[in-house]
Image (cartoon, coloured by chain):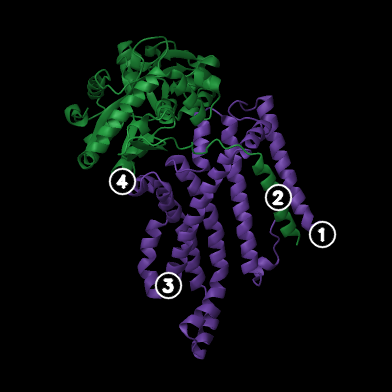
Amino acid sequence: MRRRLQPVLLGLLGILVFLAVWQLASTVGWVNGRYVPPPTEVFAALGRLVLDLHYWRTIGNTLITWAIGLGIAGVLALVLGTVIGMIPVLRRYTRSTVEFLRPIPSVAIIPLAILLFGLDRESSLVIVVFATFWQIFIQVLYGVADVDPVARDTQRSFGLSAPSRFRHLVLPTALPYIMTGLRLGATVALILTVTGELIIGVDGIGRLLVQRGTAADYAGVYALVVTAGVLALIINLLVRVIERRVLGWHQSVRAEVVL
Amino acid sequence: MKRSTLLGGLAFAATIALVGCTDTGAAPEPTEAGPTETYQVRIAALPIAETGAIWAALEAGIFEEHGIELEILPAQGGAQAIPALIAGDIDFAIGQPMGPFRAALGGEEVRIVSNYANSLASGDSDVNSVVASAASGITSWADLSGKTVSVNSLGAAGDLTIRAAVEADGGDPSTIEFVAVAFPDVPAQIEAGTIDAAWVPDPFRGMVVGAGGTDLGGPYQATIPGLTVLTAFTLQSVIDEQPEMVAAWTAALAAALEYAAANEDAVRAAIATNLDIPEAAAAGITLPEFTADLSNAGLEDLVALAMEFAYFETEPDLGTIVVQ
């Protein structure tokens, strides 16, 4: 019990020290307290936001964009990654294309997205899906290709059908990779969801953040930054929990503690 | 087991918390129906004080009276509005006129259908002005020579009129280094010394001046007094396909702007609500002259100035672009 509690306590201590330094910096004047308000002001602003239904609806909008984006990217990446990963010819043919497309920063296609879909959620989804897809796709691709050669030879001599080959050989091998891709993708999807709200103006915490900035409410801006951070933290924890459930049998997870 | 109790507790706490919630974003109650023919119009407008005219008029039912069911999308910048028009996502955009000019030169059939707001031709303050940090020692337009000056977006009326004002004052505009800084970031950047001066509207002008900065006044007043700040524009294809809607919209917008000009308090109240700023802050904002009339908008002077400073390679044809 003590061993499980210790990291949590250490983590909390870290946060407290960070908040204390921040408070000190703003009040003593190492940074201008007007533009970098102390945590007491930021959490007061957060407290006011939390009592406003509009804030929760805004978070809901962010999460909807995030979930749809991650969902589309995940399904596409799983299907395409599996098909391309399992067929060596396809892998070779697509490699240069993938290596060309993958590094394109998603924000660079924002103008194109607006041109295609306007100022609504669809535009945001374009950049979310684009960025998230590669994160998961690459993992699936490598995961599917990582099948142990001995196991592959064994299944060959046993003459397994394609579906059961996938079920018993490919999936168990690729699953840890897929979960890694999902974890990376979930965070990247949130980053680009907020980016879309900041730049395109899709409803969500990013847009609210710009609005608070325009109103010169700097404490409000930081309160929304904290909100985004907490969202990312919750999402990460959720994915970790799912990972533990799905990969409970796998050695990479067995020894690990979630928090 | 522990986790489910925790979740249950959280859900309970959330329910309790939500009971005490207010809702500033709730949709207003629908009012009585207006004319029989209604058009659904989607526009992009910047989430700034100037949009207060539309918010106030919308609340007063002006658009409803004219058969316009209005939806306002808060575009984050002029650069987003024109692609959204081309995508067919919005019918009109409210933005500064250099955007449509550039788009027209780029081959898009952008049409300015109405004025929206003119800057103030005279008076102590204008809707935006150039403020300089005390440390920079800038006290006149000519002093801006060789300094770093920020505008919210480069290549628009802000830096153009600043160049002209500096030149008219005997300075050398070619030595000014213009940088793009978002208005909310200006006070901190001035203080940090990364920029010497900035072109800003309220409340950021007040923040810089309050911290000891100098207000040089409005570059519009110094060059083209009363130059339009925002216009309403669309595409020729929209005008061709839905002429009745465009006519209804321009009539509604004219009425809305007339209402806004006559009801300053309503505009300020709408700004306070929609931008979620304190009433006192909204009261201190310098409002532009809301008008649909393009005759005193100074567009010809703006084009001439842009040509003089080589902002455009070819001259945008106002006769085609402006269709009022």
Give the amino acid type for the residue marked by disc 1 in the picture: Met
From the top left corner, tell me how far across and down residue B63 is, in percent: 36, 32
Instruction: Confirm whether circles 2 and 3 share one chain.
Output: no
Residue B298: quarter of image = top left
Give the amino acid type for the residue marked by disc 4 in the picture: Ala
Nearer the observer: mark 2 or 4; the answer is 2
The residue under the point 45% across, 60% down is A72
Local SS, label 1? loop
Local SS, label 4? loop
Instruction: Confirm whether circles 3 and 1 share one chain.
Output: yes
Chain letter for the part of the structure drawn in purple:
A
Look at the picture and state if B125 lies above or below B46: above
Q: Which residue is mark 2?
A: B12
**Is residue A221 at least partly visible in the picture?**
yes
Q: CA distance from mark 4 to mark 3?
A: 34 Å
Q: Which residue is mark 4?
A: B87
Q: Which mark is residue A1?
A: 1
From the top left corner, tell me how far across and down residue A65 is, in percent: 48, 51
* Structural crowding at the residue carrying mark 1, measured as other residues with C-alpha within 10 Å and reported as few (<14), some (14–19) or many (≥20): few
Instruction: Confirm whether circles 2 and 1 share one chain.
Output: no
Give the amino acid type for the residue marked by disc 3 in the picture: Val
Q: Which residue is mark 3?
A: A83
Q: CA distance from mark 2 to mark 4?
A: 45 Å
Instruction: Indicate the quadrant containing the N terminus of chain B: top left, top right, bottom left or bottom right.
Output: bottom right
A227 or B133, nearer to the observer? A227
Q: CA distance from mark 2 to mark 1?
A: 28 Å
From the top left corner, tell me how far across and down residue B234 is, in percent: 27, 36
A89 or B25, nearer to the observer? B25
Q: Which mark is residue A223?
A: none
Chain B visual colour: green
Look at the picture and state if B44 lies above or below B157: below
